[in-house]
Image (cartoon, grey):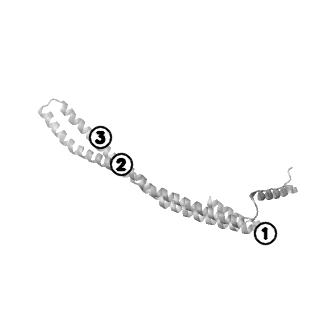
Amino acid sequence: MSKSAVKISLDLLSNPLCEQDQDLLNMVTALDTAMKRMDAFNQEKVNQIQKTVIEPLKKFGSVFPSLNMAVKRREQALQDYRRLQAKVEKYEEKEKTGPVLAKLHQAREELRPVREDFEAKNRQLLEEMPRFYGSRLDYFQPSFESLIRAQVVYYSEMHKIFGDLTQQLDQPGHSDEQRERENEAKLSELRALSIVADD
């Protein structure tokens, strides 16, 4: 919006009417100055939001690929563990012969490091996931506070800019109703011209 407001004020400044009427030129110059101030504060707000909100959100989002990889590694370890556990259970159900006991022993030996790997990955996720989720609020709260502060500063400055502009352009002793009546009277005069008469 501020870019379009600056464009409007520049277009008004380049209008030939401003060259003919010093009061209009003064009002449009005041508007142009206010719009440029508004644009500068808007850009400052955008930069502040980029630095304190957008960049931290992107940084936080970059944590997710490694988190997702840890979950996938745990799932893969769980699948390996279940596959080997099923193998052990299959040999335990068979008749206890020499070759079956040897295969059972070998399957149990294969299962032990896989189970330890799964349990370690599972334990790590069980310990760290609650802390990760709990830290989200602590991480984002300063960003949201900064967003709110940036908005407060921006709108406070906008109030000041437009308050100053109103004082510069305001005609003392005129109420809004009087201004409206004056505008209607001027429009009526324009409508009365023969070049704008309805056909």
Q: Nearer the viewer, mark 1 or mark 3?
A: 1
Q: Which mark is residue 130?
A: 2
| The furthest residue to the top | 95
Mark 2 / mark 1, whichever is N-terminal: 1
Quarter of the image where one finds residue 34: bottom right
Which of the two marks, 2 or 1, is nearer to us in this view?
2
Q: Quadrant of residue 187?
A: bottom right
Foreground: 25 or 150? 150
Q: Which residue is mark 1?
A: 20
| Helix, strand or loop under label 1 | helix
Label placed on residue 79: 3
Q: Residues within 10 Å of mark 2 (few under 14, many from 20)?
A: few
Name the amino acid type tagged 3: Gln
Q: Is residue 41 left or right of residue 84?
A: right
Q: Position of residue 14 (x, y in %)?
A: 72, 66
Rounded to the nearest whole Å, what is the CA distance between mark 2 and mark 1? 71 Å
122 left or right, relative to 12: left
Q: Earlier in the sequence, mark 3 or mark 2?
A: 3
> Label 1 is placed on what type of residue?
Gln
| Residue sitting farthest toward the front | 173
Packing grade of label 1 (10 A; few <14, some 14-19, many >=20) is few
Q: Residues within 10 Å of mark 3 (few under 14, many from 20)?
A: some
| Amino acid identity at mark 2 | Pro
Q: Is residue 140 above or below residue 115?
A: below
Q: What separation in Å lies between label 3 and label 2 (alpha carbons)?
A: 23 Å
* Rendered image: mark on residue 58: none
Left or right, residue 108 beside residue 185: left
**Residue 141, position in %: x, y?**
45, 55
**Residues under numbered marks 3 and 2 in contact, where contact means CB atoms less than 8 Å apart:** no
Query: Of residues 160 and 194, which is closer to you in this image?
Result: 160
Q: What residue is drawn where x is 64% and y is 60%?
A: 4
Of pointers 1 and 3, the one earlier in the residue sequence: 1
